[in-house]
Amino acid sequence: MRLSDVALQVIWNRLISVVEEQAQALVRTAFSTSVREAGDLSAGVYDAEGRMLAQAVTGTPGHVNAMADAVAHFMREIGVETMAEGDVYVTNDPWLGTGHLHDITMVTPSFLDGRLVGYFACTAHIVDIGGRGFGADAASVFEEGLRLPIMRFAARGVVDRTLLTIVRANVREPDQLVGDMHALATCNEIGHRRLVETMREFGLADLTKVSDFILTASRQATLERIAALPRQSATGEMTVDGFDRPITLRATVSVEDGRIVTDFAGTSPVDAKGINCPLVYTKAYACYALKVAIAPDIPNNHASLSPFEVLAPEGTIVNAVHPAPVALRHIVGHFVPDTVFAAFDQIVPGLVPAEGAGCLCNFQVSLRPTGPGGRRAEVLTFNSGGSGARPSADGLNATAFPSGVMTMPVEATEHAGPVVIWRKELRAGSGGVGAHRGGLGQHMEVGALPGHEFDIQAMLDRRDHPARGRQGGGDGAPTKIARSDGAAMGVKGKQFVPEAARVVMAFPGGGGYGDPAQRDRALVHRDLARGYIDALQAREVYGLSADDVEAVLAAAKRGEAG
Amino acid sequence: MAATRARLGVDIGGTFTDVVLETAEGVRHSTKVLTTYAAPENAIVEGMARVCAAAGMAPSALGQVIHGTTLATNALIERRGARTALVTTEGFRDVIEMRTESRFEQYDLNLTLPEPLLPRQMRFTVAERVTADGSVAIPLDRREVEALADRLAEAQVESVAVGLLHSYIAPAHERLVREVLAERLPDVSVSISSEVSPQMREYERFNTTIANAYIKPLMASYLGRLEQRLADEGCTADVFLMHSGGGIMSVADAAAYPVRLVESGPAGGAVFAAHVAARHGLDRVLSFDMGGTTAKICLIRDGAPKTARVFEVARSYRFKKGSGMPISIPVIDMVEIGAGGGSLASVDAMGRIQVGPESAGSEPGPACYGRGGERPAVTDADLMLGKLDPANFAGGSILLHPERSAAALHAQVGERLGMDTEAAAYGVAEVVDETMANAARVHAVENGEDLSGYTMIAFGGAAPLHAGRLAQKLGISRVLVPPGAGVGSAIGFLRAPFSFEATRSVYMRMNAFDPGAAKALLAELTEEATGFVRSCDATADVGAEVKLFMRYVGQGWEIPVALPPELVAAPDAGAILALFEADYARLFSRIVEGLDVEVTVWAVNAATAPEPVERVDQPPAAAGRVEGKARTLFDAGLGQAADAREVARDAMAPGAQVSGPAAVVEAETTVIVPAGYDVLCQPDGCLDLVVAHEAKEDAA
């Protein structure tokens, strides 16, 4: 009997649960909107070698590899021999952490009976880190805020007061930030306690056997998936709006023996604005794209991630080096999966979706009173366009991909400041046509309460480069943005909006998949009844007769199911 | 509510309708009848006839019928509601379809999102707008609503939900819509969000209101028929409904707010466990209910199940959070796990044993049923490990086939992992117990609780087989298995008070606290909640519990803070802040200096006083150890088969004791006592499993 295998199975499950508990604890206590509403956090457990054994599945794939690599950096910089029980280490270095200063990563060594047995790490997006604030306007990372090199947050249980004093003096919301730093440390502590309990329950002195079991099984399963793919190489390319000039992302995916290499050679150089990606963030999204396509069921850990290798020449926008500005690295990062899919679709057709909205359609408004009696406020919202149509299903309407973040309720947003969201609803006709339709984008209209004006920091894309369809599917509708008084606006950057004017936006739809003539008639009827498409599209693209169109619309009016 | 006449508890479940009669003297008779989907009242009438016959009384002698049902939940899951329309604010037609704009599963390219309850063509808008402070930015034009009424008539709607932005603070526009629709479409039922669920967050509020409107005609018709059928049978008892918050309400209120009936069955189970907890004077209890397809876990503190303000029904994807629809009403907070006796085991790409949420159901059932099931279920593993007696399963009604369990476990698990059948069975049982333990731990963390020091109360067919091991995994040293566990929910209905919780979203910062406004708001909510309870019982003492949901400004999660009566009478910012900080520190081990605190939701729960319990304080007089007969039982804690005792539950008189490993068998199920635990029969018939050395200390 190999009962020890049962115990190892149980311990693996337990570790996955431990990191979920760690993440839950953080969501409950964090101040940052993007942590609690958008799940912009990660938590992981590591063996004594610094190899990640389990990671919580949270709202963002952007931390996937970053977390896997982080602990090794801490071991090197801190020095394993100097680590002591009660220590907690911290950094927000974009190149050693998760790609921008707004993510704080904390690592805690885990000791059992005086012996270092593993590590816990967690990362969260925090409210503010000083500098110019969250935007793309900095010329270098020095302007983007306070940078904490890898250092001790607590030594033998005592928090470094000097560090906290410096942090407090450099950020806009010191209480919230220090609160979040404590929350991160507590979240590691919860993980540590649970690990110790588990090791005692199973009589383990170290994690060697557990680690071998998890990593061997994961590596083997991942290699099997890779071995099942054709040994081929293909290059895909996608151009997006960028800030002041278009950006071309180019990826060559090569399926090799025991690994898949993704090389971004040929990608545009770094931008003057803060939309550049450190390689660690590019790796995360490239890796996510391939994993979700071929190994979605294999949990993230050191062994399941390492066969996915990602390269990019230094100085490209996907491998920006210090001191390039990187605050809004998510914009380029969110386009990485569509680029990787463009290549991978040539190796394994019929698996990956058409292009989608890609980057989140976020904007931040800075409101201020025009006279006495008003109030100032900063309000950030997360929104999504449509996702790309799949080989056998429509794209998802107004749903984030590849990001997993959630939007906030309009009522909550309007409590956060004197802002009014006048419209937030699906954008009819915006899905790329096809046998499978692209997901619909959405309309949003934003203004201020009387007595206020505001600046809007737009972080949109795909105005000039809509999501492309695949296999004969049509493109999704492009982004639109304008002021209600007729003034033109850009998709990115800080722009003034006077009192009583509104910003009118339409977020992009996803690309379609396959020939629209092949679309199931019942789905065309349904789309028309629901108003996902209009009568013109129904007739001209999908070939419905005028009588059919009339009959469908009349049935919808009578409330018959569509 | 001291009962002076016999009472009937009725739980309509997915498979069985459980009926329990309790006489004024406290004697119980129970029965299970197959649920009659087309006319659920038929099963009730049949069950009532059986228990009345057993008790030797006529239905006319019943004083009360208390009823909980999954009918509301099932109507939502199966989409069998009325033709319903939504009327909402212009610009927000798609709130229920856009949800949170996220994917509930990160790693599935072919993810399908659940369809909203109403398709887009049934969602209508009117030009109007209220802002966050409740002031009107765009007034609602009555003529527009009148014109809309014609369109609703054309669409042949039977029920209308009205959900307008910020109506929880300014309901006038919603009321105007209702008024106009009542004039123009008198036969159409109207539900408005400011009454059904007056809470901030439009997606939850609108969806809850739509769900209410959607099931309202169905439930109103059912409740009318039920009263008629009962009257036809000579039963003139008052009928009350169990609601999701763990109390009971009148038929009229249930017909107006049927969404509050969702999850009323499981709520009864939690009330049942809370009553057992009160009997034994336990202040920290984990209730554990495990059946054929799911397990449910609930925390009970100081005799009251933990409650929440929002939950999810109709999860469409492996019980995954986010794959269902949110319902924001006061509810007993339960975690539902896809783990039951019928949950199927498999091996994944990494060679990991996975159990559930896919279930064998009752057809074909686990492999051991011998009805064609070829995949191993948890019941197969339990059988292989000696936890079940093949000749005495479900009272002997199903003969189990161990050789089929062995074959299924070997083919699907053992062979793939190089394990023998016993190890494979052990692996499956460990994985399902670990899955439940993990869910319980995460739930405890979410509630800032530590489960060590908790007592588990286990009920439902499969729970007694797994409770002991689950307790070991959670570091819980005591487990109670009450009698009557098979009809626990229906018994729970008989223990529930009349109650109603009124809530309101009103933001108030502590540095701008308005004691006058706070007092007035609480008085209004108390009046509203008490009114509902008074409609059930005009004379009973009605108490009101006040909870404020508070957080640091900038946080997204609130914590509930209970206000003592003196602070309700005279709200004081400093005292309320101190209560918040004490609760926050208890939950998160620290407070945050320098940040303002705000109240977001105000809640008043009015309830009649709970029935006094007969406390089981004294340990029963020792009735000696029961030896029973020898049996081999695999003990998961030891990781091997062990010589164990088998005892019939009937043979366990109060005070009788057995040492684990042991199996205490009864008609419905078997209670497994792990090695290292002793089991003692308490005076109320509860089997009390305690870690052996603690039992010795108690005795000393």
Image (cartoon, coloured by chain):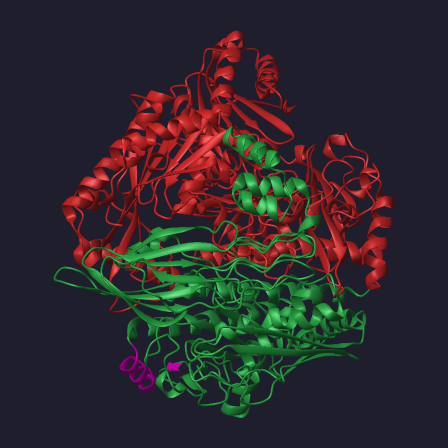
The residue located at (27%, 69%) in the rendering is B593
Q: In which quadrant will I find the N terminus of chain B?
A: top left
Q: Is residue A79 above or below residue B401?
A: below
The overriding secondary structure of the stretch rendered in magenta is helix
Q: Which corner quadrant of the image does residue A471 belong to?
A: bottom right
- With respect to residue A92, does B228 lie above or below? above
A57 vs A410, left or right, is right
Q: According to the rendering, which colour does chain A have?
A: green
Q: Position of residue B387 (x, y in %)?
A: 74, 46
Q: Colour of chain B?
A: red
- Tell me where residue B626 appears, x and y as whole percent: 68, 41
User: In the image, residue A538 lies at what x, y percent?
Assistant: 59, 44
Residue A161 is covered by the magenta coloring = yes
Q: Is residue B73 magenta?
A: no
Q: Which residues are magenta?
A: A158-171
Q: Is residue B468 visible?
A: yes
**What residue sits 65% from the left and 52% below the top?**
A436
